[in-house]
Amino acid sequence: MDLVSAAPHARPPVDQTLVETQRAFDGVASTYARSNAENPVLRVMRRRALAALERWVPCGSHVLDLGCGPGADLESLAARGYRVTALDWSAGMVDEARRRVRAAALQGRVDVHHLGIQELDRLSPALYDAAYSNFGPINCVPDVHVAARLIADRLRPGGVLIASVIGRVCPWEIMLYVSRGDWARAFVRFSQAPVPVPLERRTVWTRYYTPGSFEQAFGEAGFSRVSLRALGLLVPPPYLLGFASRHPGLVSGLQSLEDLVADWPGVRACGDHFLIVLRRPGR
């Protein structure tokens, strides 16, 4: 989810945050896949998430895609031999994902449902081998502890969750806004409450997590960490597309360096996102 952090405002009721977030993504659904595909930083983040899935989830597994958006990962997942059940809170995104599935003739391997992560208990009863959530959909759920229990209930014993989560400590963002004297924007991710993030004149309500706070919430639901790495630690955040486009060589070099250090203790807790793999007990 490529969003620009914004200064905190008064928090509306939880149901209203979900409605506003849904409308924001409905409003950009038709162009979201293209804009993400044109962003070199997001392309690399996507590849890292898919590589983690391939590493930890055997080919042929049934994967639950949490917050699939316009379905950009669905073709890749199907091509890698996975069966996919996908869901998203935005009706517009679901329509785009279903069009993509039909165009690629993937109806036998991919199902797309109009459901939010907070509504997982409404999905027809089934257990999945793995869950996958890319670009921060879990950041938008009202209560991560509830979401963790709902996800745990849908995974087989030993099943894994691969999640790309928007992090709290983004060095680039802090340095950028401190240099501009905008202290509120520099440290907005440290808010404990949901933060209103602008998206094409609408609002996405977002919670930011450290890997520790995210892992704690899922630990209460029985998960344990398998792996953790930073995403967007040394490279600029995705919303600095202009900088990345003007300096492709620099960004490529920073990405190579990031890949060398991204799983180091301490370092891996920072970045625009973090990529975490968590396992349910069982085998």
Image: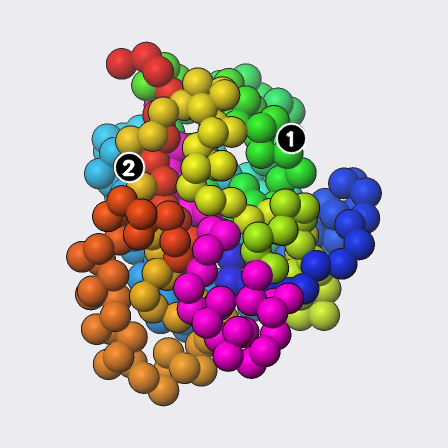
Residue furthest bottom as drawn:
246
Q: Which mark is residue 119?
A: 1
Stretch of the chain drawn in magenta? 159-187
Q: Is residue 178 magenta?
A: yes
Which of the 4 image quadrants contains residue 63? top left
Of 23 and 208, the residue lying toward us: 208
The foreground one among 226 and 96 is 226
User: Horizontal placement of 187 versus 82: left or right?
Assistant: right
Secondary structure beneath dot 2 equals strand
Q: Is residue 136 above or below residue 84?
A: below
Q: Amino acid at mark 2?
A: Ser
* Number of the label disc, if any, that sits on residue 227: 2
Residue 33 to residue 153: above or below: below
- Name the residue located 76 percent from the left edge and 58 percent from the top edge: 9
Residue 120, how many percent across, how many down? 59, 28
Any part of residue 93 in sight: yes
